[in-house]
Amino acid sequence: MPSLAPALEARLQVLRVLWFAQLASVGIFTVVCALLAHAGTLGVDDPTLAGSLRRLFVILAFTFVLVASWWRRSFVESPANPVYLPVDRGGGRYGVVPSTAILGRLQVNCIIVWALSEGVAILGLVLGVLSRDLVEFLPFAAVAVALLYIHRPTAWPLERVSQAIS
Protein backbone atom coordinates (compact mmCIF):
# COMPACT_ATOMS: atom_id res chain seq x y z
CA MET A 1 0.00 0.00 0.00
CA PRO A 2 2.41 2.73 -1.09
CA SER A 3 -0.33 5.39 -1.39
CA LEU A 4 -1.36 4.99 2.26
CA ALA A 5 1.87 6.30 3.80
CA PRO A 6 1.70 9.80 2.23
CA ALA A 7 -1.97 10.11 3.25
CA LEU A 8 -1.14 9.14 6.82
CA GLU A 9 1.77 11.54 6.96
CA ALA A 10 -0.48 14.32 5.67
CA ARG A 11 -3.03 13.64 8.44
CA LEU A 12 -0.28 13.61 11.06
CA GLN A 13 1.05 16.89 9.67
CA VAL A 14 -2.41 18.44 10.05
CA LEU A 15 -2.36 17.43 13.72
CA ARG A 16 1.05 19.03 14.19
CA VAL A 17 -0.16 22.26 12.57
CA LEU A 18 -3.30 22.33 14.74
CA TRP A 19 -1.22 21.84 17.88
CA PHE A 20 1.17 24.64 16.90
CA ALA A 21 -1.76 26.96 16.12
CA GLN A 22 -3.22 26.35 19.57
CA LEU A 23 0.16 26.98 21.16
CA ALA A 24 0.58 30.19 19.15
CA SER A 25 -2.88 31.35 20.21
CA VAL A 26 -1.63 31.62 23.80
CA GLY A 27 0.93 34.16 22.58
CA ILE A 28 -1.78 36.04 20.70
CA PHE A 29 -3.96 36.03 23.83
CA THR A 30 -1.05 37.54 25.78
CA VAL A 31 -0.79 40.46 23.35
CA VAL A 32 -4.56 40.98 23.31
CA CYS A 33 -4.76 40.90 27.10
CA ALA A 34 -1.88 43.35 27.45
CA LEU A 35 -3.46 45.76 24.96
CA LEU A 36 -6.93 45.58 26.49
CA ALA A 37 -5.60 45.80 30.04
CA HIS A 38 -3.56 48.86 29.07
CA ALA A 39 -6.55 50.49 27.36
CA GLY A 40 -8.64 49.95 30.51
CA THR A 41 -11.94 50.30 28.69
CA LEU A 42 -13.33 46.97 29.83
CA GLY A 43 -13.33 45.52 33.29
CA VAL A 44 -14.95 44.93 36.63
CA ASP A 45 -14.70 47.66 39.23
CA ASP A 46 -16.27 45.72 42.09
CA PRO A 47 -13.48 43.96 44.06
CA THR A 48 -15.90 41.36 45.44
CA LEU A 49 -17.06 40.42 41.96
CA ALA A 50 -13.47 40.36 40.70
CA GLY A 51 -12.47 38.02 43.53
CA SER A 52 -15.42 35.73 42.82
CA LEU A 53 -14.57 35.62 39.12
CA ARG A 54 -10.95 34.85 39.94
CA ARG A 55 -11.95 31.91 42.16
CA LEU A 56 -14.45 30.63 39.58
CA PHE A 57 -11.92 30.81 36.75
CA VAL A 58 -9.24 29.07 38.80
CA ILE A 59 -11.68 26.26 39.59
CA LEU A 60 -12.69 26.01 35.92
CA ALA A 61 -9.04 25.97 34.80
CA PHE A 62 -8.23 23.25 37.33
CA THR A 63 -11.24 21.30 36.02
CA PHE A 64 -9.98 21.67 32.44
CA VAL A 65 -6.57 20.33 33.50
CA LEU A 66 -8.13 17.32 35.21
CA VAL A 67 -10.51 16.58 32.32
CA ALA A 68 -7.69 16.84 29.75
CA SER A 69 -5.56 14.39 31.71
CA TRP A 70 -8.48 12.04 32.33
CA TRP A 71 -9.57 12.22 28.68
CA ARG A 72 -6.17 11.25 27.39
CA ARG A 73 -5.77 8.37 29.84
CA SER A 74 -9.32 7.07 29.35
CA PHE A 75 -9.68 7.34 25.62
CA VAL A 76 -6.18 6.98 24.22
CA GLU A 77 -3.77 5.11 26.46
CA SER A 78 -4.60 1.43 26.78
CA PRO A 79 -2.20 -0.34 29.16
CA ALA A 80 -2.72 -3.65 27.36
CA ASN A 81 -1.69 -2.37 23.95
CA PRO A 82 -0.63 1.28 23.53
CA VAL A 83 -1.15 1.20 19.76
CA TYR A 84 -4.86 0.44 19.91
CA LEU A 85 -7.43 2.64 21.53
CA PRO A 86 -9.89 0.95 23.88
CA VAL A 87 -13.53 0.83 22.87
CA ASP A 88 -16.44 -0.13 25.10
CA ARG A 89 -18.20 -3.20 23.68
CA GLY A 90 -21.00 -2.95 26.23
CA GLY A 91 -21.50 -4.78 29.49
CA GLY A 92 -18.05 -3.80 30.76
CA ARG A 93 -16.28 -5.64 27.91
CA TYR A 94 -13.57 -3.80 26.04
CA GLY A 95 -12.03 -4.51 22.69
CA VAL A 96 -9.91 -2.58 20.26
CA VAL A 97 -10.79 -0.15 17.53
CA PRO A 98 -10.31 -1.54 14.01
CA SER A 99 -7.07 -0.25 12.48
CA THR A 100 -8.97 1.87 9.93
CA ALA A 101 -10.59 3.89 12.74
CA ILE A 102 -7.52 4.31 14.95
CA LEU A 103 -6.12 7.47 13.35
CA GLY A 104 -9.47 9.22 13.14
CA ARG A 105 -10.22 8.52 16.77
CA LEU A 106 -6.73 9.61 17.81
CA GLN A 107 -7.14 12.88 15.89
CA VAL A 108 -10.43 13.64 17.62
CA ASN A 109 -8.96 12.91 21.04
CA CYS A 110 -5.86 15.02 20.37
CA ILE A 111 -8.02 17.97 19.36
CA ILE A 112 -10.27 17.61 22.42
CA VAL A 113 -7.30 17.54 24.82
CA TRP A 114 -5.63 20.48 23.06
CA ALA A 115 -8.88 22.48 23.13
CA LEU A 116 -9.18 21.87 26.88
CA SER A 117 -5.57 23.02 27.27
CA GLU A 118 -6.21 26.15 25.24
CA GLY A 119 -9.40 26.72 27.24
CA VAL A 120 -7.25 27.43 30.29
CA ALA A 121 -5.62 30.34 28.43
CA ILE A 122 -9.03 31.60 27.29
CA LEU A 123 -10.23 31.67 30.89
CA GLY A 124 -7.12 33.64 31.81
CA LEU A 125 -7.68 36.02 28.91
CA VAL A 126 -11.19 36.80 30.09
CA LEU A 127 -10.00 37.25 33.67
CA GLY A 128 -7.10 39.45 32.58
CA VAL A 129 -9.38 41.66 30.49
CA LEU A 130 -12.02 41.93 33.21
CA SER A 131 -9.46 42.71 35.89
CA ARG A 132 -7.51 45.03 33.55
CA ASP A 133 -4.34 43.25 34.66
CA LEU A 134 -2.01 41.17 32.50
CA VAL A 135 -0.61 39.56 35.65
CA GLU A 136 -3.97 37.85 36.21
CA PHE A 137 -3.63 36.21 32.79
CA LEU A 138 -0.03 35.01 33.02
CA PRO A 139 -0.52 31.98 35.34
CA PHE A 140 -3.31 30.71 33.09
CA ALA A 141 -1.09 31.18 30.04
CA ALA A 142 1.76 29.31 31.73
CA VAL A 143 -0.52 26.39 32.61
CA ALA A 144 -1.92 26.30 29.07
CA VAL A 145 1.57 26.25 27.53
CA ALA A 146 2.64 23.53 29.97
CA LEU A 147 -0.43 21.44 29.11
CA LEU A 148 0.11 21.88 25.39
CA TYR A 149 3.74 20.86 25.86
CA ILE A 150 2.78 17.80 27.89
CA HIS A 151 0.23 16.81 25.23
CA ARG A 152 2.40 17.76 22.24
CA PRO A 153 2.11 15.60 19.10
CA THR A 154 5.30 13.68 19.83
CA ALA A 155 3.88 12.63 23.22
CA TRP A 156 0.93 10.90 21.54
CA PRO A 157 1.37 7.49 19.91
CA LEU A 158 1.14 8.99 16.42
CA GLU A 159 4.07 7.07 15.00
CA ARG A 160 2.89 3.78 16.48
CA VAL A 161 -0.59 4.36 15.11
CA SER A 162 0.91 5.19 11.72
CA GLN A 163 2.93 1.96 11.77
CA ALA A 164 -0.06 -0.08 12.92
CA ILE A 165 -2.22 1.20 10.07
CA SER A 166 0.30 0.99 7.24
Image: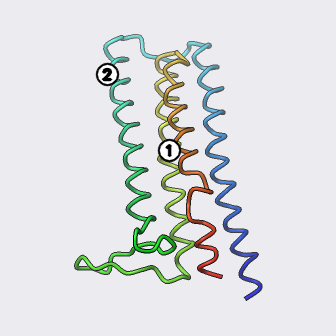
Going by the image, does 54 lie left or right of 158?
A: left
Question: Residue drawn 61% across and 80% down?
Answer: 165
Estimate the x, y position of residue 14 in percent, counting from the top left.
Answer: 68, 61
Which tag is nearer the camera, tag 1 or tag 2?
1
Quarter of the image where one finds residue 45 = top left
Residues tagged 1 and 2 counted as in contact (Cβ below 8 A)? no
Estimate the x, y position of residue 64 in percent, counting from the top left.
Answer: 40, 43
Which sits in the foreground, 41 or 25? Answer: 25
In this picture the colour scheme is: rainbow
The amino acid type of the residue labelled 1 equals Ser
Going by the image, does 104 lie left or right of 90?
A: right
Instruction: Establish if 112 lies above or below 139.
Output: below
Distance in Å between CA atoms under marks 1 and 2: 22 Å
- What number is the disc on residue 117? 1
Marks 1 and 2, the one that precedes in the sequence: 2
Q: Is the residue marked by circle 2 packed among few (<14), some (14-19), or many (20+) residues within 10 Å? A: few
Going by the image, does 119 lie left or right of 39?
A: left
Q: The C terminus appears in which quarter of the rendering?
A: bottom right
Instruction: Establish if 115 lies above or below 34.
Output: below
Q: Is the residue marked by circle 1 packed among few (<14), some (14-19), or many (20+) residues within 10 Å? A: many
- The residue where tag 2 is placed is 52
Question: Residue drawn 67% across and 56% down?
Answer: 16
The amino acid type of the residue labelled 2 equals Ser
Q: Secondary structure at mark 2?
A: helix
Question: Residue drawn 56% across and 82% down?
Answer: 100
Q: The N terminus appears in which quarter of the rendering?
A: bottom right
Quarter of the image where one finds residue 10 = bottom right
Question: Residue drawn 61% across and 13% down?
Answer: 38
Q: Secondary structure at mark 1?
A: helix
Estimate the x, y position of residue 113 in percent, counting from the top left.
Answer: 49, 53
* Outermost residue, front side: 80
